[in-house]
Amino acid sequence: MNNNLINLGESIFNEIDNNDFLNSNYDNLLYNYALIKFHLIDKRQNREVDTDAVLRFADLLSKSTHSTKKDQHKMWAQEIISLLLELEPDNNNIKYYAGSILSNVGNFRGRDLVDSQYKEITLQEKAFAAFCKNYLTIPSDKTKTFFLQQKNIYDRMGGDFLSYSAPTSMGKSFIMHMFIQEQILNGKKLNFARIVPSKALINEVRSDTINDLKNILEEKNYRVVTAASDISLEEEHNFILIMTPERLLYLLINNPDFEIDYIFVDEAHKISGRNSRGPFYYKVIDMLARKNPMPHFIFASPNIPNPEVYLKLVTEAERGTENAVTSSFAPVTQFKFLINCEEQSISIYNDHTKNPVFVCKINQSGTTVMDYILLMEQYDTQHKQKTLAYFNSKSAAIAKALEFSQYRQKQDIPELKKLAADIKREVHGDYFLTEIIEKGVAYHIGYLPSSIRQRIEQLFKEGKITAMFCTSTLIEGVNLPADNLFIANNYNGRPKMSGVEFKNLIGRVGRIKFNLYGNVFFVTDGKRTTEKDYLGLLQEPVKEQKLSVVQDLKPKLKKHIIETLLAGDSVIDKYNDHQPEEEYVMMRKFGMILLQDIMDERDSLVSREFSKYLPDGGVEQIRASFSNSRKYIDNDINISVDQTRRLANAIRNGSSFPEITDGKFNHSVVLGFLQELCSIFDWDRYEFSTLGKRDNDGNYRKLSWYAVILAQWMEGHGLNYIMRQAIRFRQNNTYPFYLNSYTVVNYDDSPEHRNVVFSDTLEVIENIILFSISNYLLRYANMYKSIHGETSLDKNNWYEYVEYGTTNEMTIFLQRNGFSRESATYIKEYLDDYVILTENQEYKLQRNLLECENANVREEANSIIYNIPQLFYSETI
C-alpha cells in the first residue's frame, strides 16, 4: 500500500513538468510580468491566466515529494506565487495561498515578507506547521528559522568531513556562521577557521561575525582574527580565524603547533579551474590534514553538481558521496530578461521550458546596456529599487558609472555627503567617486580603500546608494542585495565566464531578507556576446567540477615539471613562450608542492596525480638530487629552492635591510634594495610582468614606479599624499601611458588620466606592495632572523613597515588590534584625545573614540570593543 502511494506521488510529480496547461499559463504569467516591468500595460494586451487553477498547481508543486525534482517543484511554486503577488497585489486569495505555499516549502522568512492571512485549519495542519517551525528554528537564535535545505546541511556539520553545494541565495555562509555561534554558546573551547576567496570579503565576514556575537566573544573568551600578526594570537583565547588561503598558510608556517578544530572553505569552487591561487588551497588543506588531531573539514560551493570532488583533497575523506550534500533549492527567484540589441527584441526566459518568451520589439536601433539601465531608472522615480550593473573590466565599470551619474541630481542625504567629503580627503579631490557618490551612484572594482568600500556596501544595503557598477568582485562573493542586475557581457576579465561563475553572478540579485525575487537583464553587446551565448549558459547545467591539479594542469605540464626535477633543477621555467602567466604560476607552485611531497615522502593528492608520469626509480632520483638542498625546501610555495639558496647566501655575505633615518625612505635607496631583491629572487624569470618587467632599453621602469609608492607607504603617508605624488611622478615621466590593457597614449594629466593613475596606484598597493613585495620581504626577514637571531630585526624590519604601512609603533600597535591603517593613522594624529598610558605602562583607548567624528574610525572602534574589550580604558581596571 505504502509503496503504491509512493509510486503514485512520484508519477504525479514526474508528469507535472510536462503539463501543457500549466506551462502555457506560466508562460503567460511571465509575459504579463514583463509588461509590468517595461511599462507596456497600456500598449500590450495581458495574456489570459487561469488564476485559480494556477494557484492550485502552485499549491500542489509546493508539496512535491519527487525523489529528484522536489526542490525544482518547490521553487516553481515560489515563482508562481511571486508573479501572482506582483500581478494582482490586491487579491487576498493570492495572499492567502502565498502563506500556505511558502509554509509548505519551508520558506518562513519569505512568508514573513508576505501580508498573508493564511492560518492552518485542521489540527493536523496546525500540528505539522508547529513541528516544522520548531524543527527549523535556529538553535543559537530562536528568532530565526532555517530553510529545510539549510537545516539538512546544518545537521551534518558536526561530522568529520562535509562538502555541500547550493544556490548563491540559499545562505551557505549563514549556515557556517550559525554553526560556529552554537558551538560557542554551548561553551565549546574550539578554534574555527574560515577561508574566504578575497581580502574584500575578510572585512565583511569579520564585521558580521563580531556584530552578531558581540558580548558573547568576551564572555566565552573568543577572538576574531584576520592576520597572523594580530596581538590576540599571543594571548590565551579561542579563535575564529577569517583569512584568505595565503594568509592562513603563513599563519600555519609561523605557528606550526596552532590547532584548528573546524576549517570552513567558503566558495570552494575556487579550488577548480586554472588559477594561480588554487595551489594555496591544496597546501593549506594538506598541512591541516596532517595534523593530529585532524580538524573537521567543511567545503561550501555554489551551484555545482558534485561537491564531493573537494573531499579528495583530504585522503581520509575520500569515501565520497556520503559526506556530500547537493541542494538546488533557492529561497528567492530570479526573473531573467534577454535584451537583444542587434535583433531589437526583448524576451523573458522560462526556466522550466528552457525557452525565451517573446515580449516585444525595440523601436530603436543601436541601443546598449546603458539605455536599459536608464529605462529602469526612469520607471523608478523615487529610487526605491537597487540596481547592480556588471562589466568585465574596471575601466568599463567606472565609465558607465560616470555616464549614468550624469542623469541624476545630487541627493540630500547626509551620509552620502559625508562619504563624498571623506573620499575627497582620504583619496583625492579628482577621484571620480567623489562626484558621483552624492548622487547615490558608486562603482565597486576591488581596489578601493577597505574603509570606503565597506561604507559604500553598507549604504547600498541601506538603499542610500541605489546604483552600483561592478566588476568580478560581484562574483567573488560580495553580498550586495539588489532588485535588478544588468549583465553587459558573459566575460570575467578577458576569459569567458564558466557556468559556475555565471550562475553565481545571477544569484547575487534578490535576497530573502528583503524580497522574494529579483530581476536579471542579459544585454547583448553587438560584438562578443550574443543572445545565443546567454541562452547556452542558461540552458546548460553546470558541469561537474574537477580539481585543477587533475584537469587544468595538463599532462604535458606535469611531464615538464617532472623532467625539470629529475634533472636536479628547481628552476621550473615556462613550458613555452606562449604559456599564459596564470597557468605558469599555477604550474610552478604545484611543482614546489610536488618536490616537498617527494622529499617528505608524503602521499598527497598532488603526488598521486604526478605518480603516473614518474619513471621507475624517479622518486628516488629526485630525492638524491635534492638531498643537499633539503634545508631550502619548505611549505612556502611562493619561493623555490634556487631563490631560497641565493637568499641565504646573500644574507650570509652581508645583505641587510638598508638603515633608515627618522622614518624616511630615499627613493634611490629603496629602488636599489628592490634591484638587489630582483637579483636574489630572479624576478626577471618569476615576476616578468610586474617586478621583473623591463622596457625596451632593458630598464626596470615598473620597479622605479613601485619604489615611489613603496617608500611613501612605509613612511606612513595617507592615500591622498600617495595619490598626489603618483600624479607628480606621471607628470615628470612622460613615457607611454596605459589607459587600459589595450590602449597606450601619452599622459596628458586630464581627469580621465588622473583617475587611471588613481586606480593603478590602488592596484599596485593591493597586489604588488601588500602581496608580492610583502611576501618577498617576509621571506627575507625570516631568513635574516634564522641566520642572525630572532631579535636581529627588532629595530629595522622592512617587512613590518610594509605590512602596516608605517614605522610608527603606535600605528602598528593599533593595526595589530584590528584597526585599519587609515583609522590607526587618524588615532595616532589625535593621540592625546583618544589614547592614555595606564599606571601599568599599557596603552588603552579612551571610550570617547566610540563617538569619534571620523565615521570610519567610529565604526571600527564600535566593532573592536566587542572583539578586544581590554583595549579600551575602564575605571574598574
Image (cartoon, rainbow, N blue to C red):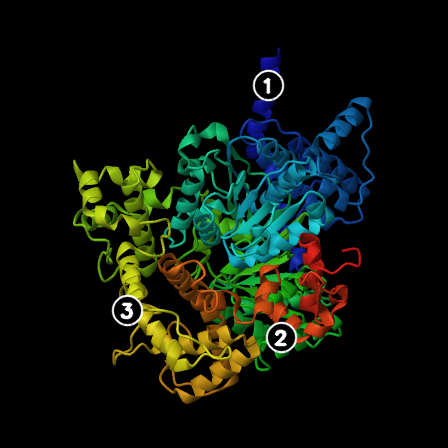
Front of the two marks 2 and 3: 3
| Relative horizontal placement of residue 743, taking residue 577 as reference (left or right) | right
Tell me where residue 3 sits by quadrant.
top right
Q: Secondary structure at mark 1?
A: helix
Question: Mark 1 packing: few (<14 Cα in 10 Å), some, or many (20+)?
Answer: some
Question: Mark 2 packing: few (<14 Cα in 10 Å), some, or many (20+)?
Answer: many
Tell me where residue 540 sits by quadrant.
top left
Could you tell me residue 99's position as x and y percent?
76, 38
Could you tell me residue 590's position as x and y percent?
32, 49
The correct choice, above or below, for 721 with respect to 802 in the image is below
Residue located beneath label 1 in the image:
6
Please, what is the three-letter code of the amino acid marked with disc 2? Ile
- In space, the residues marked 2 and 3 are separated at their CA atoms by 39 Å
Residue 66 visible in rendering: yes
Please, what is the three-letter code of the amino acid marked with disc 3? Ser
Cβ–Cβ below 8 Å for labels 2 and 3? no
Q: Which of the two labelled residues, at mark 2 and mark 3, occupies the earlier sequence position?
A: 2
Residue shown at 58% from the left, 43% from the top? 172
| Relative horizontal placement of residue 154, taking residue 305 as reference (left or right) | right
Residue located beneath label 3 in the image:
679
Residue located beneath label 2 in the image:
423
Residue shown at 82% from the left, 28% from the top? 121
Please, what is the three-letter code of the amino acid marked with disc 1? Ile
Q: Secondary structure at mark 3?
A: helix
Q: Secondary structure at mark 2?
A: helix
